[in-house]
Amino acid sequence: VKFANEYQSFLYYLAENNLM
């Protein structure tokens, strides 16, 4: 579960960078 949480956080980070 912890690994999945970090994976989602990573995707969210990339998404924010793409928006900017």
Image: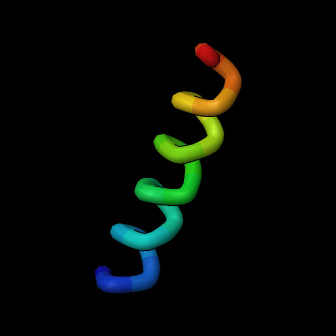
At a point 53% along the width and 30% down the height, the residue shown is 16
Residue 1 placement: quadrant: bottom left
At a point 64% along the width and 41% down the height, the residue shown is 14
Q: Position of residue 8 (x, y in %)?
A: 45, 55
In front here: 20 or 8?
Answer: 20
Residue 19 placement: quadrant: top right
**Position of 11 relative to 1 (above/below):** above
Q: Furthest-right residue in view? A: 18
Q: Is residue 6 left or right of residue 18?
A: left
Q: Is residue 1 left or right of residue 17?
A: left
In front here: 19 or 6?
Answer: 19
Q: Furthest-top residue in view? A: 19
In front here: 15 or 8?
Answer: 15
**Position of 14 relative to 6 (above/below):** above
**Position of 10 relative to 15 (above/below):** below
Classify the position of the C terminus by image quarter.
Answer: top right
At a point 32% along the width and 84% down the height, the residue shown is 2
Q: How many discs appear?
A: 0
Q: Furthest-front residue in view? A: 20
Q: Is residue 6 left or right of residue 2?
A: right
At a point 48% along the width and 42% down the height, the residue shown is 12
